[in-house]
Amino acid sequence: MEIEIRVKSYVLFNMLLESECKRISFGSEGCYYLLPSETKLREMVVAAKRKNKIFKLITPKVTEAAYTAVLSLIKVLDEYDNTEVTINDWGILNQVKLKKAKIYIGHMLNWTMEACPWHENIMRDEMETIKHLGEVSNFDNQYKIEILRKYNVLGIETDYHESAKESFVNMEKNGIEIFTHYNLVSLSFSRTCPTAKYHNLTFPACVDLCRDEEKIDISLSKIWDSNETGQHYLETDEDVKNLCRFKIDGNWIYRDVEKGSWDKVIYHVRNFSDLVNCKEIMREEK
């Protein structure tokens, strides 16, 4: 099993340099402010290289204001061996031209309908062929695979679903690597950060909070309704509350699932009580 550990904290990154982990990823799929400066990025890549680690930079979907800065960061990676980048923005992917650094597609650009907690209700009246399309990766067709090849994409990062195994096998046969996220399913990314709102913070005060790998538990307790009696909130029943128990990490909303993984796995430190606990589970999985 090939293992990658993902962090946003510089402290945890330095700890991982002394670990058995061979691939370390740093950054954010949702927030530009959590990316390192060019100077800091060079320091991290050099430190990883000294320890014979693969360094992967995780980049989010970006605004026009951050576009040039993110491109510059990615170009830094191409100055070194053993570097990778995960891209979650079509515009960035279209502009990136790399010779050394390997390119992966992230959560924000690939998905399956099964990620949605109520996907069965959405798909129940569809034909079987349509239901099947909802179970596989949106990149599992020859047209999309050719697009990945055009942009020199080595692989994708995705959620693990039992129904998507066929999709993973097919993509690997076509030369596309599959990394699955351990024990979680991505739901959405918000442009208005719910974590900052929850703590009543604004940039840059919110950055240190997210680097601490804090996660917030949320559930759908009320639904906004508008009818002939007026506008009001409706209380949800227990079945809905149990179905809609999610977690927030920065501007990323996800849910925990029973563990399941492919032969290449991404561990998020935030999903473990501490780094030591994460290492123990890694050993069990090997």
Image (cartoon, helix red, strand yellow):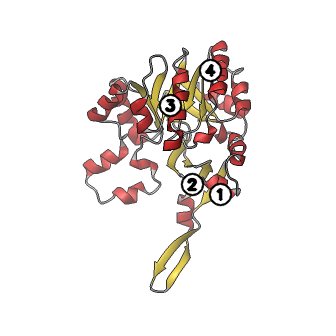
Q: Residue at x 46, y 26 (%)?
A: 103
183, 205: nearer the viewer? 205
In primary-sequence order, the first of circles 3 and 2 is 3
In primary-sequence order, the first of circles 1 and 4 is 4
**158 left or right of 206?**
left
Separation (CA) of disc 4 from disc 3: 17 Å
- Residue position for label 2: 192
The image shows a total of numbered marks equal to 4
**Residue 111 image position (x, y, % from top left):** 42, 43
The three-letter code of the residue at mark 1 reads Lys
Q: Which mark is residue 45?
A: 4
> Where is residue 97, by image quadrant?
top left
The three-letter code of the residue at mark 3 reads Leu
Q: Residue at x 33, y 24 (%)?
A: 173
**197 left or right of 182?**
right
- Residue position for label 3: 71
Separation (CA) of disc 2 from disc 4: 31 Å
Mark 4: which secondary structure? Answer: helix
> Where is residue 284, by image quadrant?
top right
In primary-sequence order, the first of circles 1 and 2 is 2
Q: Which mark is residue 197?
A: 1
Give the vertical position of 85 relative to 32 (above or below). Answer: above
In primary-sequence order, the first of circles 2 and 4 is 4
Mark 1 surroundings within 10 Å by alpha-carbon count, few (fewer than 14), some (14 through 19), many (20 or more): few
Mark 3 surroundings within 10 Å by alpha-carbon count, few (fewer than 14), some (14 through 19), many (20 or more): some
The three-letter code of the residue at mark 2 reads Thr
